[in-house]
Amino acid sequence: MGDNYIDKHRSVVVEDEDMEGREATVVLTGADGSLVAQIATVIGGGKP
């Protein structure tokens, strides 16, 4: 794949089962700490 390919699917492990269904915000920062992107999601899948 070329340099312009962006994979929009990532996963993280949330060990606390009680968190499933809760809204969360994923934040991506650059090496200098600047905000690159953020997106709302739901732990375990779904839409906020």
Image: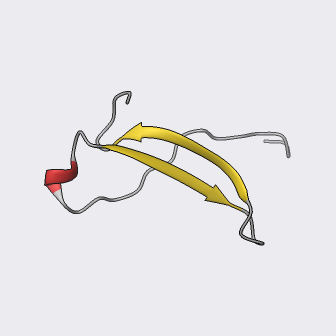
Q: How is the image coloured?
A: secondary structure
Report the side of 4 relative to 34 (left or right). Answer: right
Whole-percent x, y for residue 39 in the image: 54, 40
Report the side of 6 relative to 15 (left or right). Answer: right
| In the foreground, 48 or 6 | 48
In the picture as drawn, the residue positioned furthest to the top comes out as 47
Whole-percent x, y for residue 4 in the image: 84, 40
Please say if 29 is above or below 31.
above
Which quadrant would residue 15 be assigned to in this image? Answer: bottom left
Whole-percent x, y for residue 38 in the image: 59, 46
Residue plotted at (33% across, 59% down): 13
In the picture as drawn, the residue positioned furthest to the left comes out as 18
Residue plotted at (37% across, 30% down): 48
Is the N terminus in the top left, top right, bottom left or bottom right quadrant?
top right
Residue plotted at (14% across, 52% down): 18
| In the foreground, 15 or 18 | 18
In the picture as drawn, the residue positioned furthest to the bottom comes out as 32
Which quadrant would residue 22 be assigned to in this image? Answer: top left
In the picture as drawn, the residue positioned furthest to the right comes out as 3
Please say if 41 is above or below 28.
above
| In the foreground, 40 or 10 | 40
Residue plotted at (56% across, 54% down): 27
